[in-house]
Amino acid sequence: MLLKTVDKTKKILSVILAIIFVASAMSLTTYALTDAEKQEYQNKIDEIKAQIEENQKKIDALDAEAAKYDGKVASLQEKIDVLQQQIDLHNQEIAIIDEDIEKIDAQINGIQKEIDTLNAQVKQLDAQVGTLEKEKEATYKLLGERIRASYMAGAGSTLEYLITSDEFEFQSYLERVELLQRIAEHDDAIVAKLEKNIENISIKLAEIEDVKTRLGTKVSELDSAKKEYEVKKQEQVDARSVVEASEATIQGELDKVQAIVNGLDTRSAEYQAAIDKREEAILELENKLSDRNVYYGSGNAGDMCWPLPYDDVYVSSRFKIRWGRQHNGIDTCRWSGTHGADVVSVKDGTIEVACWGWGGGYGNYVVVNHGDGVLTYYAHLSNITVSVGQSVKQGQVIGQAGNTGYSFGAHLHFGLMINGSWVNPLNYLDGGSTIQCTDSL
């Protein structure tokens, strides 16, 4: 029984160790961040930084131009365009840094998991070695007792037994001696096997410790990577602060533009140029959103309530070609005043985006994912009352209407995207076909 236990233990240990060594060998290569990958990331970052520097020169030149031609909407709007490019570049930089950080994180987490697994397996082996040591001690004790019994019997009594015994008793004595010899040989074999097994386990444990040492070396290397990680995290923070500062600058420039536009004759070329620039910026943003947010499903978007839950709402601009460009949504307002009015989710869903700031022209805006490939957009908000990942019910307040972003008056811009394409919200909203529209077709 003892021999069977030992053989079974050896088989289990062999399988465990084989798995350990294969996994350990893989770990040393699977999680390595190669020099080529590091260089690729750095090249991308350097390229973006060079573009950022070029854009900064444009911004400086536009600042000088704006000072020379104070009150010119075109120069202010051009500066807004360049600042938006700067934001896009910094966001690209952040995305690359995030990717690099994610890879370093995967390395650190992967190695640590393997070390934890290895430690658990070593602990298990230590326990098995302890069990075998106890079995060896028990065997030695049994042998000792047999030797002591034989010694106590003494050689004299054995000789006396041989002289005085008849043939049958002598034959019985020889059989007992042979039996005792076989038992002794058997005991020796058990002890030898136990000792050999313990020796083998000790060797394997030493090999495991060697693997642990090599993994420890890998972790030390990863500590250097973690330092790179911290540097990149700081670069990310710095880039985000530049984005926030740029957004604040844009909003300041846009406030100047709005003040000028409000004083222009709506029939003037300058007014029309300002509107064209705004429409171009918003369309560019919406094209980016369409390219990025490609969700596919049944496209079931029915049973949508109105996003401004009031009786005195109207549509100031429909889903149509406006000023030579597609208006991918509707602008809706209240006769009694739009700024600060509650905005609600038109259908049950999950908050996909809750963006504060310039928002590429949308200002503060929220995106709700309703499933089935359906997304709704609520732009130019003065306030946001939800957060990303939050579940919302139909009619639940998600923010308040306002005039943030590229907007020349308080309103809610509401967009509906189905399977990656913008569609006319009035075809899906409850009462959309009867709502009053103040713009001309």
Image (spheres, helix red, strand yellow):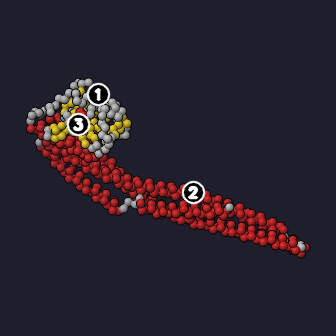
Give the distance between the C-alpha atoms of the residues marked 3 and 2, in whole angstroms.
Answer: 65 Å
Which residue was labeled with disc 2?
123
- Which one is closest to the eye, mark 3 or mark 1? 3
- Which one is closest to the eye, mark 2 or mark 1? 1
Q: Secondary structure at mark 1?
A: loop
Residue at point 63%, 59% (across, down)? 130
Which residue was labeled with disc 1?
309
> Where does residue 206 sit, x and y in percent of width and height?
55, 65
Q: In the picture, which quadrant includes the N terminus?
A: bottom right
Q: Is residue 308 left or right of residue 154?
A: left
Residue at point 45%, 59% (across, down)? 219
Q: Is residue 201 left or right of residue 376?
A: right
Q: Secondary structure at mark 2?
A: helix
The answer to whether residue 73 of the structure is visible from this angle is: no
Give the distance between the C-alpha atoms of the residues marked 3 and 1, in whole angstroms.
Answer: 19 Å
Task: Indicate the quadrant where residue 315 lies.
Answer: top left
> Where does residue 115 sit, x and y in percent of width and height?
49, 57
Across the whole image, how many numbered discs are drawn on residues?
3
For label 2, the crowd category at 10 Å Cα-Cα, with few meaning under 14, some 14 to 19 and many 20 or more, is: few
Give the distance between the C-alpha atoms of the residues marked 2 and 1, in whole angstroms.
Answer: 64 Å
Amino acid carrying mark 3 in the image: Asn
Between disc 3 and disc 1, whose residue precedes? 1
> Where does residue 118 sit, x and y in percent of width and height?
52, 58
Between disc 3 and disc 2, whose residue precedes? 2
Residues tagged 3 and 2 counted as in contact (Cβ below 8 A): no
- Which one is closest to the eye, mark 3 or mark 2? 3
Q: Is residue 336 left or right of residue 73?
A: right
Which residue was labeled with disc 3?
424
Residue at point 84%, 68% (across, down)? 153
Above or below — where is 437 with respect to 284? above
Above or below — where is 405 with respect to 60? above
